[in-house]
Image (tube, coloured by chain):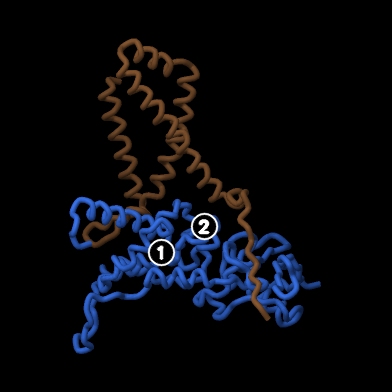
Chain colours: A blue, B brown
């Protein structure tokens, strides 16, 4: 008999269910299968009603984040062979409402992301004839790791503050704000400060550090937030000592 | 079909789910003991201002067995707080020297060296 593994999946059908419940599926075990392969097997062969998000199957699109045995993971990045248990528990990402089965409602994140203005803000319009905006390798190194974020939301599921205060701007959005603040081409720091340096911005973070632990792209949101706290404190001090000075 | 998203509540026991959350909660708990020790220091200042006999009885209270025990427990938690905080400092204070990032280990070592230097100054000032 070929080897199998059981997937215990949290199901929720908003048309029928009053609350979510677990449903178990037996799927073939293969050494090179990730949890996403097992979900696709269920969808194709066992139960076509199972809903979940995925796209690239190679840890680039950031769509397939789920809680796997209680830990936020990209399901395309979680090999069955790394789980010794016969039963693997799969749930939607923590700290987000469940739309259906493993699909979460991420509207709140999209709003938070746009609130930090995650794009280059220039002082003045540059005509195309000026050519490229050159940057030295050192200027690029200052922010490069933060550009790797794929908005997979694993950091929001890992962060207890995100669960306890739904208004917390959260790790990914604050790391992206930091990424643009550090970019030598950007002049939008003061435009972002109202959100970033607010109580529900960096100051809601208590430095648990879980966001950086679970990041599949090795972005370090915890570092970005602590550095922003220091920068925001210095800006505040500067404004206090030198009123009217340009920040 | 209308949408009916389901919101799950965060359990009070969320911090027992993973070792990293337990370690974080212990670090948060340490601040309670650092608060207690700060209160002891403030009390010492008040007693000092009240004169020699008040100060002597304060010192005697600190030297009693319960006094020493409280200080030992506070020292234990303060050490845990400092060690875990030093481990996190490279994230908060990335240092660049001549265009090269200083390694996390070096930043942590500098903090330990500063801690040792300050402790030495305090011990010398206290006449130990």
Question: Image check: A14 left or right of A195?
Answer: right
Question: Image check: A180 left or right of B65?
Answer: left
Callout 2: few (<14), some (14-19), or many (20+) C-alpha neighbours within 10 Å? few
The spot of residue B43 in percent (x, y) is 38, 24
What residue lies at 43% left-to-right and 65% top-to-bottom?
A219
* Residue assigned mark 2: A165
The spot of residue A104 in percent (x, y) is 60, 71
Q: Quadrant of the C terminus of chain B?
A: top left
What residue lies at 30% left-to-right and 40% top-to-bottom?
B113
**Chain letter belonging to callout 1:** A
- Looking at the picture, does residue A102 appear above or below residue B121? below
Question: Image check: A150 left or right of B18?
Answer: left
What residue lies at 65% left-to-right and 67% top-to-bottom?
B6
Q: Quadrant of the N terminus of chain B?
A: bottom right
Choose between A26 and B26: the one closer to the eye: B26
Secondary element at image label 1: helix
* Residue assigned mark 1: A174
Examine the rendering and report whether any part of residue A223 can be seen. Answer: no
The spot of residue A135 in percent (x, y) is 24, 74
The label nearer to you, 1 versus 2, is: 2
Residue farthest along the bottom direction in this orientation? A129
Residue farthest along the top direction in this orientation? B53
Examine the rendering and report whether any part of residue B117 can be seen. Answer: yes
User: Distance from label 1 to label 2 (Cα)?
Assistant: 15 Å
Callout 1: few (<14), some (14-19), or many (20+) C-alpha neighbours within 10 Å? many
**Chain letter belonging to callout 2:** A
- Looking at the picture, does residue A19 appear above or below residue B127? below
Are the residues at dot 1 and dot 2 in contact (C-beta closer than 8 Å)? no
Secondary element at image label 2: loop
């Amino acid at each position: 008999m070929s080897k199998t593994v059981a997937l215990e999946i949290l199901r929720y059908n908003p048309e029928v269910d009053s609350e979510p419940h677990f449903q178990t599926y037996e799927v073939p075990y293969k050494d090179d299968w990730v949890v996403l392969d097992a979900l696709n097997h269920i969808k194709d062969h066992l139960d076509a009603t199972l809903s979940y998000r995925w796209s690239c199957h190679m840890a680039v699109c950031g769509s397939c984040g789920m809680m796997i045995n209680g830990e936020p993971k990209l399901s395309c990045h979680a090999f069955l062979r790394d789980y010794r248990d016969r039963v693997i528990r799969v749930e939607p990402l923590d700290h987000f409402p469940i739309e259906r089965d493993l699909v979460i409602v991420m509207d709140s994140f999209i709003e938070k992301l746009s609130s930090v203005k995650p794009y280059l803000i220039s002082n003045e319009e540059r005509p195309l004839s000026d050519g490229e905006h050159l940057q030295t390798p050192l200027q690029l190194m200052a922010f490069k790791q933060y550009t790797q974020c794929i908005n997979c939301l694993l950091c929001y599921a890992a962060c207890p503050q995100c669960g306890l205060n739904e208004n917390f701007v959260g790790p990914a959005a604050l790391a992206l704000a930091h990424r643009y603040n550090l970019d030598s081409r950007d002049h939008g720091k003061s435009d972002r400060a109202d959100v970033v340096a607010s109580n529900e911005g960096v100051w809601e973070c208590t430095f648990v550090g879980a966001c950086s632990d679970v990041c599949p792209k090795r972005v370090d949101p915890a570092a970005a937030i602590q550095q922003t706290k220091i920068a925001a404190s210095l800006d505040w001090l500067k404004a206090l000592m030198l009123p009217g000075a340009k920040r | 079909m209308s949408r009916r998203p389901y919101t799950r509540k965060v359990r009070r026991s969320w911090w027992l789910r993973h070792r990293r959350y337990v370690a974080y909660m212990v670090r948060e708990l340490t601040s309670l003991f650092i608060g207690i020790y700060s209160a002891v220091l403030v009390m010492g200042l008040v007693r000092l201002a009240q004169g020699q006999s008040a100060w002597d009885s304060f010192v005697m209270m600190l030297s009693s067995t319960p006094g020493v025990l409280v200080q030992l427990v506070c020292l234990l938690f303060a050490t845990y707080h400092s060690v875990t905080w030093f481990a996190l400092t490279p994230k908060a204070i990335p240092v660049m020297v001549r265009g090269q990032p200083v390694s996390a280990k070096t930043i942590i070592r500098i903090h330990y060296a500063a801690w040792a230097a300050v402790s030495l100054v305090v011990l010398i000032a206290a006449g130990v």
